[in-house]
Image: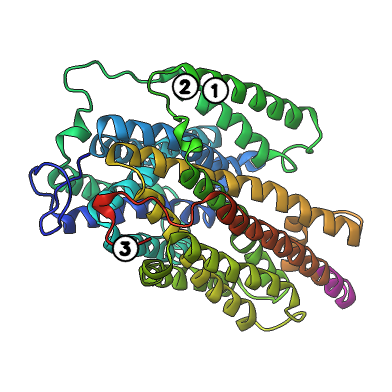
Amino acid sequence: MTEPYVKGVATAGPATPATRRGPVVAALMLGMGLAAIDGTIVSTAVPQIVGDLGGLAVFSWLFSGYLLAVTVTLPVYGKLSDTFGRKPVLIAGVVLFLIGSLLCAAAWNMASLIAFRVVQGLGGGALQGTIQTIAADLYPLKERPKIQAKLSSVWAASSVAGPAAGGLLAGYADWRWIFLINLPVGLVALWLIVRHLVEPERATARRPRARVRIDWAGALAVFATGALLLTALVQGGVAWPWLSAPSLGLMAGAAVLGAVTVFVERRAAEPIIPGWVWRRRTISAVNLALGALGLLMVAPTVFLPTYAQSVLGLGPIAAGFVLSVMTLSWPISAAFSNRVYGRIGFRLTAVVGISLALLLLLAFPFLPFPGEPWQPALIMLLLGAALGLFQLPLIVGVQSTVPYEERGTTTASVLFCRQVGQSVGAALFGAVANGVLAARLGGGDLDTLARALDAPGSLTAGTMDGLRRAVDAAVDYVFVGAAGAAALAPLVLLTLAPRRFPVLKEAAGDDA
């Protein structure tokens, strides 16, 4: 096994030209910033985009199309990075993302903008998975929380700065600048990667004298299966009813294509999703646990802003702050998590973190009505700390159990399961919230009620209070459901994961 040689860092494998870690880390943070800020910066400019291009009925695909492309390409890019090296895959991802950004800025109608957002997502899939893998390549086990905390801080800053930047650009310039500002940032990241990232020979030529086999049939099968499944989850209950022909047809098609994917992958010489990803207890347990994390994260990220505005009566900026405090404590907790897992191990640290998160999610329904903004903000602050203690040890731990040539596939599988969990959570908890509202009000959905409360018009005080209480109850049930998802994670870890992760020798500085 070989590792990239980084000046000043002891690593296994033959010496290769030194990689300057500082510039590479800067490039990774810039690249992660492109992917992190993309969703939040676009969301605030939707009214201007729709006013210019039209397409109100399908504008949700600006987000769904991007998410779909990112998710279904993660396993493909993970395998490609293990086969051809991280550097060419990351370069291709940045270039594709920038091409998509330029095309989005030139879009002439909503259909073209959605198509170009998909192109952006194809590049975004390479950014997310490959950046996380390179971060693990650059740092030994004891130092990996540092880079992970830096990457987490990028997400935190993006969640706060994205909506503000999008609103300013759309309001005082033009919404097309939302995509054009990606170009200078991406070009700087690209220059740093090309100039400073050097990989060992193994990473760039896995079989120097043999023809590399690419499982294109498997890649297409994975892409098609994921596309149908995620489309059904994202659009079900929104564009059409859950039990309608489109939903049932997409689900059935995803099931059939899933069976085809398993058949193709079992016969492939170099499968996109190798069987060992699920046969190894550690990897399969982490995949399922982080799938549960994606599921529960829907409650705070999707439903809390609506709660803050509709129940607490806060404006959009203040509501965003209630959520953003979670992203402030998350990287701090992650940065110090190595002091915990170095003593008690990866598995037990993650179990402690998710157990604390479970208690906090269960505490949310006990908040008074209507309550004070500091109360949910405090829960979010503590929740971020708990989840930082849960997620990072699992990612660092599972990356440390595989050799260099399997790390890209392993990292991509973890991120893929987390993304799928988010899609399942959005569909499931959306149905829960709307079901509660239907039981209390006889119909309606959360978005419709939120708009009514933002512009009350002729609504009486009693009606307003009843609507707020209904939204409060719906969000409470969502948080209870999120707590149920949180309860699945320790169950999976304690049942499937070994007590001590089988960390490889070259990474075994901690007894984890």
The amino acid pointed to by label 2 is Gly
Q: Position of residue 164 (x, y in %)?
A: 46, 65
Region of the chain picked out in magenta, as a range: 458-467
Residue pictured at 72% horizontal, 56% vertical = 447
Compute the Cα span from label 2 to label 1: 6 Å
Observer-nearest residue: 303 or 316?
303
Dot 2 or dot 3: first in sequence order is 2
Count of labels in the image: 3
Residue pictured at 27% horizontal, 61% vertical = 509
Helix, strand or loop at mark 1: helix
The amino acid pointed to by label 1 is Thr
Q: Is residue 473 left or right of residue 403?
A: right
Helix, strand or loop at mark 2: helix
Q: Position of residue 86 (x, y in %)?
A: 27, 39
Observer-nearest residue: 47 or 511?
511
The answer to whether residue 52 is visible is no
Dot 2 or dot 1: first in sequence order is 2
Q: Is residue 459 above or below residue 177?
A: below
Q: Residues within 10 Å of mark 1 (few under 14, many from 20)?
A: many
Q: Position of residue 378 (x, y in %)?
A: 58, 80
